[in-house]
Image (cartoon, rainbow, N blue to C red):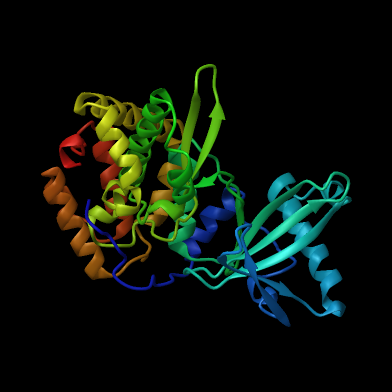
Amino acid sequence: MQGNKPSKKKVFYPISDGFRAYLSSHNRTADLPVRYEDLLRYTASTELLNQAGENTYWETVYYQESDREELYHSLTHIYALLKTDGDMDVIEHLDVARVDYCTFGNTKPFRIRIINRLNDNYDHFYIKKADASRVYGLELEDLLSPNHVMYLVDEDTLIEEHIAGIPGDDFMSKNLQDSTFNQIRMAKEFVKFNERCFVRLLGDMRAYNYVIDITPDIEGNQYRMRAIDFDQQSYEGRKSFYLPQYFKENNPIIFLGFDHMTPETVRQYQLEERALIAARVKASKEQFESLFDVMIQDEISSPTKVQQLKEELAYHHKADVFLSCQTMGEIVLTHIHLLLRKDFTQSISNW
């Protein structure tokens, strides 16, 4: 497996008027009482360590006492907007336990820890700078994957729900030594995840950018891989960047596939996942078309990267139709149309 890194720091692209209108029409916008910039006015911070005493790349931030009560009330309000469509009755027993800030990554997110005072149960959500690439990634995740995603946008502020699961790198270091039955299911899910990412061109799915949700089943466990980082939605120019199989961080689970699956089995799982994606496109046809009416007009990557990706996909699929694409949105739409026509050539031979 070869290494695969972004060419350089991700460029931010603003949400266009057309995309904002789409988001508004599908209940993805809200008038927020707090914006991302408001959270930057903290007065102190302390390093946040994990249970092993290791650096987490997060720091807990603190605000002036005169501002904290109003800020925390606004944050519980946002949580209600995200979870209950603004029903304020649910926040009566909620409070903000902690606000964390991460300087690692493109979006420099704030993570808000919400706690229920009645039972000490907690949840999280995130406040980030709104980047068009990321928001397109969230919307495509909701439309084309088996996962629903809750998020809201207000001007240049993005609110995202927390996606629960074991981080991929932690999972591979601690959970792979299991029964053969469960190992086969893990490998199967990676094949399907790899297919979902490639079809909709979601890049940079190295192990720490997705989580694994484990569900106990009648026999063994079921596994679901879920992306948690959408910054690299159709942004980079290299085809391999959209295939998780090419990231060395994913090698442990890929090797499980080599041990337990034949090429014919992998092909079967790929076809199953393509059929599911096609069914989701058809089930949300009107919304899908409305999204791509906007996306094909938007600038969400550089002309150089657009040129490189369309040439690499044209070669990969032996399909010159990519060469007439002018934007990343057009490339993604063309890629999905290939899937719908059952003319999609990604297979085990490419592993």
**Residue at left 45%, top 54%?**
209
**Residue at left 31%, top 43%?**
199
Could you tell me residue 327's position as x and y percent?
29, 60
**Residue at left 20%, top 28%?**
263
Q: Picture quarter containing residue 45?
A: bottom right
Residue 52 in view here = yes
Could you tell me residue 173's position as x and y percent?
44, 47
Q: Picture quarter containing residue 339?
A: top left
Could you tell me residue 178's position as x and y percent?
44, 31
Could you tell me residue 22's position as x and y percent?
52, 53
Which of the image's four quarters has the C terminus? top left
**Left/right of residue 286 with respect to residue 204 in the rendered view:** right
**Residue at left 19%, top 63%?**
307
**Left/right of residue 181 with respect to residue 150 in the rendered view:** left
Residue 157 in view here = no
Name the residue furthest top. 218
Query: Could you say which is closer to the camera, residue 156 or residue 111?
Result: 111
